[in-house]
Structures are given as structure tokens and as C-alpha cells.
Amino acid sequence: MSLRPRAHIHLANIADNWRILQAAQTNGVTAAAIKADAYGHGLPQVADALHEAGCDHFFVAHSHEAEVTRATLGSHPNIYVLNGPSPDEEALYRENALIPVINSSFQFRTMADWLVDGIKMPRGYVLHFDTGMNRLGLPPKDAHDLAEAGAAQDPILIMSHLACSEDSDAMMNGHQLETLKTISNAFPDTPMSLSNSGGVWLGPDYHFTLTRPGIALYGGGHPPEGADLKPGMTLEAPILQVRQIEAGDTVGYGATWRATEPRLIATLAIGYGDGFPRSASSKGFASLGGKRCPMVGRVSMDLITIDVTEAAELARPGVYAQLIGPDAPLEEQAALAGTIGYELTTGLTPRVKRIYES
Ligand SMILES: *Cc1c(COP(=O)(O)O)cnc(C)c1O
């Protein structure tokens, strides 16, 4: 048996989470954000499972991710490229029937150049307006001009992105919603999209024609009570060694953690070289048979030390401890490491073996 960290990818849970998100919508369709290797879960496998479940709309950030999605899923689904097109990518977009998301006037001109010969984009294009995030997107004031300039081919979707969707009290949500509604006056018959996962939980006003959840598919984010999302992955690592230490002994690099009484310490075969953040040092935990064992001392490149005194009967070499999963909720572990679920799963390196389970 190889003593390697592994992530069981729960494809059935991811599909169930998509169904929960679809059911949370009164009308419209639920797309899936599968950028960054489906948040570290594996793009082709997740795309396949969601397509099986009935998802027909997939959002990625980069055109190379879109190519993989197309090769995996065949010709049917719509594949949207959030970061937008570069001028030299016309053939790639046309051959793979990719839907460019137009984020800037430069990207709009790129698109317009592709349309001059009168051959429309096979699945159309999306206009992304920036309604307050000031990150990516066209200015709302240009909506009417863009509606006229789009004469060669109309956009199939108008979208924007929420800055504060995880905070249902944030004033900004309402402001962005109103701004998008104003933009929609310039495109009276065009479908609209505003919500990521957090936006889905904000309720029907935010749903429009299409929602674009990502993190919720993988069991993360901050769903409302009762949403009952399931973990997208279970991350675990084997114990390599168990040792008894005495009061006054220290653990790990920098000797940053010191025992005040005799403790039992287990060393796990996972570290920041696997993408488990060093910021979890002496803050995160691993679960052994449901018992929480705190991380003690620094997370190093290949190893993490945990205090297994309370789970001594289970602590043996070769036994796997859970770092993300049903006994170690993603967002809780991420928060302890000073980060968010997105970064934790996306950061897992190829050294973590992915095991796909349906
Ligand atoms: C990543 C992304 C999403 C998905 O966001 P989640 O918070 O993971 O649900 C939706 N829309 C855009 C524009 C994105 O970049």
C-alpha cells in the first residue's frame, strides 16, 4: 500500500448538490462552474457526472479548460469562457463551439472582428457587465451603445457577478441587482444571469434565467440551514509514525509547539507540498474515526503532526486521518487555516491522488 494522501471525489454527491441548487430555483436553469479543475475535484470527471445529472451549461475561466470540457462532453452542452477571448482564438472558439464571455471593450472589438465576414458565432456570445465589483466586465453606461453595436449578432445572455453574495445583509447585493435590471432595459428579450452559489441562496429575485454555482456543487460556501449539501471530496492522509512525547518537548520546525503534559503525536503524510496550507500550523485538525485531533507544530512540505492522545486506540501507522470531508467540514477547516473552501480544494496539488467514486 502506498502511503500517499488521497482525495475521494464523491461524484454522486456533486450531482446531488447540483439537483439541490436546481430545486432551489423557481424557474430557469442551473449551470455549473467547473473552472480550476472543477475546484480541484477533476474537470472531466465532474463535467461528466453533472452532464449525466442533466446539467447543460458549463462555465470555465480559460479557453483551454473549455477545450477539455468540449472533448469530454461532446457537442451538446453550452460551454462559456469567463475570462473572454483573445484575438488569435477565433478558430479555437468556432471549432469547439465555445461561448465567449465579453468583458471589456477590447474583447467586444475582438468579437466584432470575428463577425465581420457575416458568419455568426456557433452558440453566440455573452455580455458581462460590471455592476460594482470593479474587477471584470463592461461598464453599465455602455449598455445601449453595445445593444446597437451588437447588430451583427445579438448576445445570448447578459450577465453580472455579485461581490457580496455570501452576506445576505450586504447593501451591495440590492445595488447590483438594480443596476443589472437597468442594463436589461437595453436588452429587453435577452436572458440574464447574476448569481453564483451565494446568489442562489439570496432567493428568487436573484435567479433570473440562469445561475452559475460553483462552490456549492462541491459542498462549500455558506448555504442556508437545511440546504443539506454533501461534501464533494474526502481528503485523507495516512499516519506514518506515532510517538509519545513528554511535558516540555516541542514538535516540528521552529519548535513552535510545546507540550505541557505527556501527549501522543502522529505524523501524517501530507503537507503544503500537497497543497494543505502552512497557515493551518497549530490551528487545523484531522479526524481519526470521528475524533478531532488538533494539528500541533508547523505544517511542513510533506508532513503534518497531530495530537492523537484522545484517539490513541486508533493511532497506528497506515491508518488514514481525514482532513476534509464529513468529519472535517471544508469551510471549518479552511477558516482555521485563515482561508476559504475554494482555496483549500483548488490548491490541492497532483501529489494528492484523486479516487473517483460514483
Ligand atoms: C467562479 C465564478 C462563479 C461561481 O462562483 P461560486 O462562488 O463558486 O458559486 C460564478 N460566476 C463567475 C463570474 C465566476 O467567476
Image: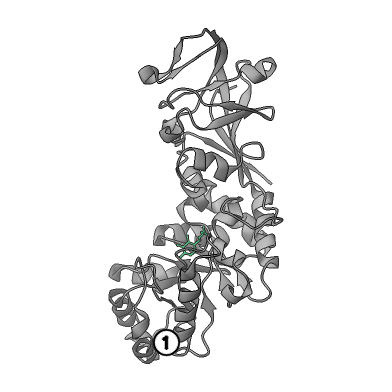
Q: Nearer the viewer, residue 169 or 298?
A: 169
Q: Classify 353 as above or below 173.
A: above
Residue 171 on image: x %, y %: 48, 70
Q: Is residue 310 above or below residue 74?
A: above
- Percent position of residue 85, x then y: 35, 69
Q: How is the image coloured?
A: one colour
Q: Residue at x 56, y 64 (%)?
A: 168
Report which quarter residue 52 is drawn in: bottom right
Quadrant of the image occupied by residue 150: bottom left
Horizontal side of 314 relative to 60 (left or right) equals right
Relative to 233, 342 lies left or right: left
Determine which quarter of the picture holds residue 318. Answer: top right
Measured as percent of width and height from the top left, residue 108 is found at: 33, 78
Residue placed under numbered mark 1 in the picture: 153
Q: Is 237 placed above or below 87 here?
A: above
**Crowd class of label 1 (few under 14; some 14 to 19; many from 20; radius 10 Å):** some
Q: Residue at x 62, y 17 (%)?
A: 309
Please name the residue shown 44% across and 25% down the image.
Answer: 302
**Mark 1: which amino acid?**
Gln
The N terminus - image quarter: top right
Residue at the spot 34% in from the left edge and 85% down from the top edge: 142
Whole-percent x, y for residue 66 in the image: 46, 61
Within 8 Å of ligand 1, the CB of disc 1? Answer: no
Helix, strand or loop at mark 1: loop
